[in-house]
Image (spheres, rainbow, N blue to C red):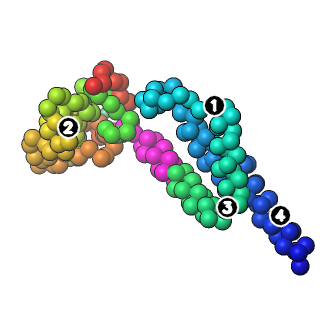
Amino acid sequence: MNNTFEILASVYMLIGAVLGTIGPAGKNISEEVRRARGTPFTNEIMEREQPSALTLTLFRLTVTIGFILLWPLFIYGIVKEQRKDEADSNAFAEKLRQGLWFQYNMGGCGTVTCGDCNHSESVTSFIHGIDSSRTGFQCQSCGKLEAIESGGPGRANEYARSLKCECGGSFERDKVIFCPTCKSKNMSYHMDFIT
Ligand SMILES: [Zn+2]
Ligand SMILES: [Zn+2]
């Protein structure tokens, strides 16, 4: 009886040790240690010294032992979160493959160029002012690229004018940029400046 318990306990801890080192939780533990170590920059901000190597080793050991003892409480959440992160980054990579987006791969002000018809024009993705900002939009009907003024800090979503284009179409931001001339999505962006 006693023997069975010992075997089960060993198997339990072995599973915990594998999950907490080379398994999925090992990655999270390393991430926690990295966070505890901080960077010269974050340590500066928090006005603290970087923890010593010994402190960090003890920290890693404590977290790992805690995990090995209590792994069934954590493993489901850890795996679920990692799956979600992976799905998010796949979805993001897929968006970037589709083309240019104001909010993902265009910053500040620059020039968009069509890879099919060579049409090129300057465009504002987003610039801050002191009490106003300008945000780039594209009319989904005629393709016109427009920077629309909005409020200052905290009011960047309050636009000074309606999001209707003079052609009757609507200005949108959360869409892949297409060439106003030939409608191609094969566009590239060169940033001139960022604010
Ligand atoms: Zn074009
Ligand atoms: Zn339009």
Query: Is residue 27 at least partly visible in the picture?
Result: no
Give the mark, 4 or 3, whose residue is nearer the N terminus: 4
Question: What amino acid type is highlighted by mark number 2?
Answer: Pro
Give the mark, 2 or 3, whose residue is nearer the N terminus: 3
Residue 10 got which mark?
4
Q: Is residue 188 left or right of residue 1?
A: left
Q: Is the magenta stretch mostly helix, strand or loop?
A: helix
Question: What amino acid type is highlighted by mark number 4?
Answer: Ser
Could you give the CA–CA distance between mark 2 and mark 4, rounded to whole angstroms? 57 Å
Q: Is residue 148 left or right of residue 188?
A: left
Please name which of the two marks, 3 or 1, marks the residue nearer to the observer: 1
Could you give the CA–CA distance between mark 1 and mark 4, rounded to whole angstroms? 33 Å
Mark 2 secondary-structure assignment: loop
Could you give the CA–CA distance between mark 4 and mark 3, rounded to whole angstroms? 13 Å
Give the mark, 2 or 4, whose residue is nearer the N terminus: 4
Q: In this view, does 115 lie to the left or right of 145?
A: right
Question: What amino acid type is highlighted by mark number 3?
Answer: Trp
Q: Is the residue marked by circle 4 packed among few (<14), some (14-19), or many (20+) residues within 10 Å?
A: few
Tell me the quarter of the image containing the C terminus. Answer: top left
Ligand 1 within 8 Å, label 4 CB: no
Q: Do the residues labelled 2 and 4 touch (CB within 8 Å)?
A: no
Query: Which residue shows up at 44% across the image and 32% down it?
Result: 46
